[in-house]
Image (tube, helix red, strand yellow):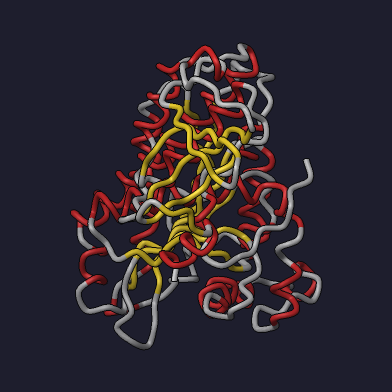
Amino acid sequence: MKMKRVFPFLLLTIVLFSGVFAFAAENSRKPFIVVLDAGHGGKDPGNRGNGFYEKDIVLDVTLQVGKLLEAHKDIKVVYTRKTDVFVELSRRGPIANEVDADIFVSIHCDSHNSQAHGVGTFVMGVDKSGRNLETAKKENEVIYLEDNYQERYAGFDPNSPESLIGLSIMLEEYLDQSIMLAGLIQNNIVNKLKRKDRSVRSAPFWVLHSSYMPSVLVELGFLTNNSEGPYVNSKKGRSELAREIANGIIAYKNQISLATEDFKNPIITDEKMEKAIESAAENIYDGVSFKVQLAASSNKLDTKPSNFKGLKDVSREKEDGLYKYYYGDTSDYNKIEMLKTFARQKGFSSAYVVAFEKGKKVNLSQVLKSKAN
């Protein structure tokens, strides 16, 4: 499936992009396979901010995430490591490919020479601004600890922008799905745990490069920050972070399940849609009203459901001599994307999201970018 290239800056804006619903319903009995990757390990300690060991923190969080997921009978968890061992970057992604995983989640902790703080979730891509390049370079430099790394990585240089840019090409097909997964995890951690939001961003991580499924990398927080480091290292912090990562993964699975059920039955019921919306993390834009535009016509139609293929809550506005018909009205961007998907499944294949501020239509991309920046 060929996807359009998506600009890599702060990709949360399209976290529920409808391309994710192109999953096939075949092998419906196959469990939902999650590969969890605890970063670093063994001779690679990761960052040592405030004297903590990244490799130990992320292993503990990863195992806790896995335990929470394994409580669900229809989820199978595979780990790239379950003990303090060194696993080469070139091996981590292929583990997910070999088990035909549905998603790949790599867990890390961040560091900086300042008191930077906050949680960030990354998808594979090119960061044209350069702001995320240093994070990717730090995580990629573990390559130098591997034997024969020059042969294994075919001349790849973690410090070369040209090498990093080349990593993003293969994962373009899975970008929308990765953004959706990343957004659900990021929003859960930020909203439920009240952590600083460093948003969903793109950066060229090698560990995401070789996994052929939706893949994300979670930075739990900055160990180098004098308050955040101790929180991330604490028993409480680890448990809370693990819980919200697991909740984000489960919410993603639920939304994918809604889509695959739709391939068996073309009609998504209101009940199914409401359940999927409830499982999604919020993404609120204060002062903004999002609606799904269904159609524009010179004909004035009654907005009753029977005129709009069963859709409820349809409104009508006259603009530029045409009647425009809108579905839904919410400040939650995640919810409106779900409603857009619902509308398209109902038969409004060209439905799209529009934004209003103070009753006036505004440029959607500018609204989304304003929050991202």
- Whether residue 39 is visible to the viewer of this picture, yes or no, is no
Q: Is residue 336 above or below residue 75?
A: below
- Whether residue 278 is visible to the viewer of this picture, yes or no, is yes
Residue 262's x, y, as percent? 59, 18
Question: Which of these two is toward me, 70 or 218?
Answer: 218
Question: Which of these two is toward me, 104 or 250?
Answer: 250
Number of numbered discs: 0
- The answer to whether 41 appears left or right of 113 in the picture is right
Instruction: State the residue at coordinates (64%, 76%).
Output: 128
* Quadrant location, the C terminus: bottom left
Instruction: State the residue at coordinates (39%, 77%).
Output: 111
Which of the 4 image quadrants contains residue 102?
top right
Q: Is residue 112 above or below residue 364?
A: below
Residue 150's x, y, as percent? 76, 76
Q: Is residue 46 above or below residue 323?
A: below
Instruction: State the residue at coordinates (39%, 32%).
Output: 277
Question: Which of these two is toward me, 3 or 243?
Answer: 3
Residue 132's x, y, as percent? 53, 75
Residue 227's x, y, as percent? 20, 74
Instruction: State the residue at coordinates (48%, 51%).
Output: 182
